[in-house]
Amino acid sequence: MCRSLTPHAPEPVSDAELIDRVLAGDPSAERALYDAHVDRVYRLVYRMAGDLDRAQDWVQETFIRAFQKLGEFRGESALSTWLCSIAMSVSLNGLRKVKRFRERELALDDAPPMGYTPREADPDLKSRLAQAIDDLPEGYRAVFVMHDVEGFTHEEIGQALGVQPGTSKAQLFRARAKLRQALADFVKD
Amino acid sequence: MSDDQLDPRLREAAQAYNAPPETPRDELWARIQAVRSGAPVEAAAPQQAAPRVLPFRPRRAWFAAAAAAAAVLAIGIGIGRVSVEPETARLRGPSANPTTYRLAAQEHLSQSETFLTLFRTSLEERNNQRLASASARQLLATNRLLLDSPAASDPKIRLLLEDLELVLAEIAQLSPRSRAEDLQLIRDGIERGNVMPRLRTAVPPGTAPIQGVL
């Protein structure tokens, strides 16, 4: 499950109770629901966005959509997983727009030479790894970030991305293989 | 290292990937509430951390956004004209095919959202201002066409296009000699007018399912 953080909560309130209160129009319940889940959503979205403005915009959109659609939540997954699925949908849609413009830009510019890696000379492992993760296909990157960076299980990833857990495992396997390949010189060292 | 595990050094290093700063809970909540109530949003607080921006050169993208928006509108108008019978078109004029205009408006709003997102993240690059200005002028032209089209018959879209026009007009006046205060005023204007969330709300989410990405 997408774990939630509820700091300073005097008594744990179940998601079902919070949802009922939100749907009944209780504003304090809206804030409580937000507080219970915003950290996890923000962490995930920020990892995907890599940019403060975009992350804040996407988290904002996530919760606006979530409150709009809360009446449609059927409890088939945990509320936190449902929120993460909206967050990933918003993030991936946003990233697709950025990617489309990148591709148009590349079509206008001279293509880089084969094997060109912008950070090739960068000796720093974290920087090289970050570049390699950025270079992963978006689906691989989503699964890698969710599983290896944010600690989601394959079941949670499957629910959030609308795929089978086995697909998530396969994507993670391929993502790791690509990263190992991209950072082979570091691994050998 | 086994085939299905990452090297421990890589696993550890991965934790630093796009490491998020502390959640700006109250600021985000205020923004969410403002959008939901339709009220203006306060200007964003100064950034707490310097994020690593994805490698993306926005200058050409601004041109691409504006050119694409103009092209879509032109195509939309063209389709609108050819898809209506001549007699009917003569009688009803441009209102004959509102769906085409609505789609053109959605594409324009989507392009504008992307343009403004890039503009906000590139405010520091002063030499981009001339390009931003040129792109804003193209989007402004499209915006004005849409305001005069059946797309603006929806009051919500009309209001959004009118607010967008103000922002685009301000950006269109930028030059390399513009002061930092001018940029900040534009940024504040975008935030106060709640333009970005309204743009996103007006544009339906992408049609491609998430599974398609995997």
Image (cartoon, rainbow, N blue to C red):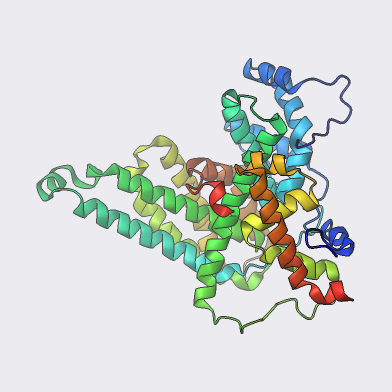
Residue occupying image coordinates x 54% and y 57%: A97
Q: Depth check: give the residue in front, B129 or A64.
A: A64
Name the quarter where the N terminus of chain B is drawn.
bottom right
Above or below for B131 versus B83: below
Left or right: A98, with B24 as reference point: left
Residue B39 in view here: no
Count of marks placed on residues:
0
Residue B153 visible to the viewer:
yes
The image position of residue A163, as x and y in percent, is: 61, 44
Residue at the limit of the structure toward the left, as seen here:
B87
Left or right: residue B88 compared with residue B65: left
Q: Percent from the top left, x then y, of residue A30?
A: 70, 25
Position in image of residue B16 (x %, y %): 84, 58
Which residue of the protein is positioned furthest toward the front in this rendering? B2
- Horizontal side, residue A31 vs residue B38: left or right: right
Viewer-nearest residue: B2 or A37 = B2
Q: Nearer the viewer, residue A57 or B3?
A: B3
Q: Residue at 85% across / 61% down in the picture? A: B13
Residue A108 location (% of width, % of height): 50, 76
- The picture quadrant where one finds residue A177 is bottom right
Camera-nearest residue between A22 and A173:
A173
Left or right side of A84 for B85: left
Q: Residue at x 80, y 43 (%)?
A: B23
Q: Is residue A10 above or below residue B183?
A: above
Going 64% across and 59% down the picture, which residue do you hit?
B183
- Please identify the residue farthest to the bottom as the structure is shown: A113
